Amino acid sequence: MAATLQQAFDAAKHIVFLTGAGVSTPSGIPDYRSKNGLYTGHRNAEYYLSHTCLAQEPETFYDYVKQNLYYPQAQPNVIHTKQAALTQQGRATVITQNIDNLYRLAKTQHLIEFHGNLYRVYCQICGQEVAWQDYLQSPYHESDGGWLRPDVVLYEEGLNQVNVQRAVAAMQTADLVVIVGTSMRVYPFAGLLDYRAPQAQVVAINQESLNLGIDYQMIQTDATSFFETLIV
Ligand SMILES: [Zn+2]
């Protein structure tokens, strides 16, 4: 941890963390988009996680999601807990692409789950919420036979507009924007950077170098070691 970066964290009044799969890989959750991530058979993850798949082949969707996305034993790591601590101090908001529930387990206060949460499950007929444990037992709602689904944004589906508005508002008031564990290539999430205040400092902590097309500080390192040394 460079002293100047620690100072930037200490001085910031409103930090926004923009995060992705790299935050959860140290907790044992693979990134299905990365090269080492999950691809099964001849079709790619984008198909299995599409609205088309859910609507036309619900069994296929269910099997894929159940076998590849749920890691109920996974626990938050130091990246989650340090960020959560800053949110508990009222100094940070987390906007994450992750759907794995780990930020909630870490008791993150100001949290925007941009793509939803796998561990919220509801019935597509009656809308009732069902425990995720029940979903992993059966894809049908016991009371009406409706297909259950996780409350995540699938390919071809629109974002939750409340989440978008909250995310934009957080970006507009941030004085420090910290990108962690994401290559910022997935839109519209990556477009959130356009809403940053002109004076906001942007820092990216990632294993591979990013190309953001803006002025920012690249910290090419393992996010775990970065957050282990960050004093919050
Ligand atoms: Zn139902």
Image (cartoon, grey):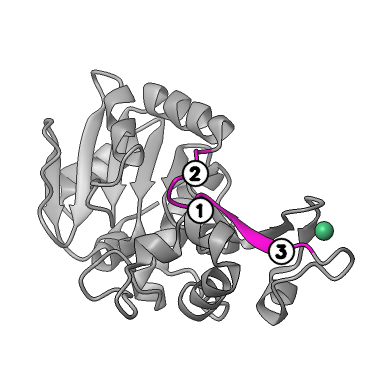
Q: What is the span of residues highlighted in magenta in the rendered image?
A: 146-159
Q: How far apart are marks 2 and 3 (CA)?
A: 17 Å
Query: Which label number is shown at residue 115?
Result: none
x and y percent of residue 64 in the render? Answer: 49, 75
Is 166 rendered above or below residue 226? above
Residue receiving disc 1: 51
Q: Quadrant of ligand 1?
A: bottom right
x and y percent of residue 210 in the render? Answer: 13, 48
Quadrant for the N terminus in the image:
bottom left
Residue at (51% x, 53% y) in the render: 51
Is 54 rendered above or below residue 17? below
Is 199 rendered above or below residue 220? above
Residue receiving disc 3: 147
Is 80 rendered above or below residue 26? above
Q: Residue 196, can we see it?
A: no
Q: Distance between the residues labelled 1 and 2?
A: 7 Å
Residue receiving disc 2: 157
Type of amino acid at the residue the image marks with label 2: Glu
Label 2 sits on a secondary structure element that is: loop
In the displayed orientation, state which residue is furthest to the right.
143
x and y percent of residue 55 in the render? Answer: 57, 57
Residue 216 left/right relative to 107 = left
Badge 1 or badge 2: first in the primary sequence: 1
Quarter-wise, where is residue 63 in the image?
bottom right
